[in-house]
Structures are given as C-alpha cells and as structure tokens.
Image: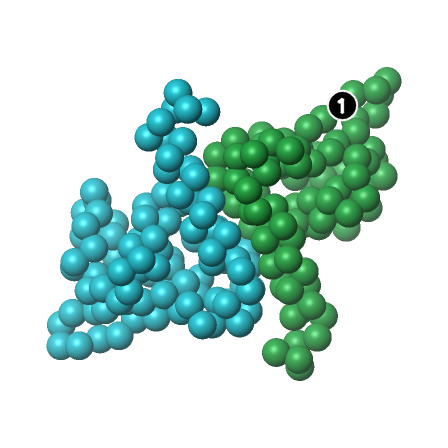
Chain colours: A green, B cyan
Amino acid sequence: MQLGDLLQAFSDPLRRRIVHRLATQGEAGCGDIELPVTRATGSYHFRILRTAGWTHTRRSGRERYISLRRADLEARFPGLLEALLRADEAERKAVAEPDAM
Amino acid sequence: MQLGDLLQAFSDPLRRRIVHRLATQGEAGCGDIELPVTRATGSYHFRILRTAGWTHTRRSGRERYISLRRADLEARFPGLLEALLRADEAERKAVAEPDAM
C-alpha cells in the first residue's frame, strides 16, 4: 500500500465514486455498484482500486464483494481517507453548482 | 484546480518532494530546489505542478520562483494539503525505516 498508488487510483472520478459508495454503505457486490460504464470497464476500475490497496475482495459463489480496507488505510495514513472523501465531496458540489464557485 | 489533477500530480515522489520543500520553506527559485534529475526533467515536474494548480510561478529576470498556492488550495479543499503532507511524511518514514512497518 503506497501513497502514490492510492492517490493515482483516487484521482479518477469513477473510482472516487466507488470509494465513496463503499465508505458510506459498506461492502457491496461488484454487480450492485451502478456505474455508467461497461462491465469490462468497471472490472478494470475495481482492479485498479484493489491493486492500489483501497479495497479488499471477497468471493462468494460467482459474485465478488468488495469493501474498503479502512483499518489498513487508517493505520498506514491516519486521516487521509477522511480528507480525501471530504475533498471528493467538495469537488462534486463544485461540479453540480458551478455558479457557487 | 481539480481534485484529480492535484492528486495525480502529488502521486509522484519527486513532485511530493517539491511540494514538501515549498510547504516547509516557502517560495524558492526553481534552480535552488535540489532534485536528482536533469534540468529538463525538473522543468517537466514543475510544469505538472503548475498546471495541476499546486504552484504559482513568478518570473524575475531569468529566474523563475515558485510557491505553493496555499490559500487557493485551502479555500477549495480545506484540510487536504495538511493531510497529504502528513501522508507523504508517513510514506517517507516507511521507506527509510522498513523494519518499523
């Protein structure tokens, strides 16, 4: 789990959306996370998050369930997750309400 | 100044070193920041930081002076700079003292 990989992974808006979903709603089946991309593209982004250290994958039957490695992230980089989630929130607000900037 | 660009820029260790230098010691002449790369490569990294929104460049004669856009960063993403600097510190400690991990 390296800072560069984590930040690189989080720099993409679609991957930020996945992390936000996992942070707010906990573990999710990959198929249950709605994304505006093909299944293959979604898998690609899930893989990036996993290899960067953001997520843990659990297999059950044919479904994969992913969750944030919150404790590992917090132990390695205290406060980083919360700061990034807050920044992501600010970014989405700015996109949704450009006049407010 | 977008979150993705800022994080992408900060994901590189050399650029993190530059940001750390500017954060701790303030404005610096580009030529005064010691980097283990060629001048051309250094210029490339300074450009990435500038276009991502991390730095402001001031020209004086033939020298360029760069500084962190601390107020802009703080206004746009409160707390993010401090969190990233702390994470960078943790990363460098882990690299320097791998046994301590």
Identified at 37% across, 49% down, the residue is B16
Q: Is any part of residue B81 visible from this angle?
A: yes
**Which chain does the residue under circle 1 lie in?**
A
Write down the residue under mark 1: A58
Is B18 left, or right, of A39 in this rendering?
Answer: left
Residue lying furthest left in this view?
B61
Q: Position of residue B71 (x, y in %)?
A: 45, 72
Residue lying furthest bottom in this view?
A99
B60 or A76: nearer the viewer: A76
Give the answer, above or below, for where B11 lies relative to B65.
above
Is B74 left, or right, of B89 in this rendering?
Answer: right
Give the answer, above or below, for where A56 lies relative to A38.
above
Secondary element under disc 1, as helix, strand or loop, is: strand
Q: Amino acid at mark 1?
A: Arg
Identified at 31% across, 67% down, the residue is B67
A72 or A14: nearer the viewer: A72
Is A51 left, or right, of B46 in this rendering?
Answer: right
Q: Position of residue A99 (x, y in %)?
A: 66, 81
Q: Is any part of residue A40 visible from this angle?
A: no
A27 or B61: nearer the viewer: A27
Quadrant of the frame with the C terminus of chain B: top left
Q: How many marks?
A: 1
Q: Position of residue B85 (x, y in %)?
A: 43, 51
Badge 1 crowding class, 10 Å Cα cut-off, few under 14, some 14 to 19, many 20 or more, is: some
Q: Quadrant of residue A32?
A: top right
B52 or A19: nearer the viewer: A19
Identified at 75% across, 42% down, the residue is A22
Is A50 left, or right, of B31 in this rendering?
Answer: right
Q: Position of residue B90 (x, y in %)?
A: 43, 39
Identified at 26% across, 67% down, the residue is B27
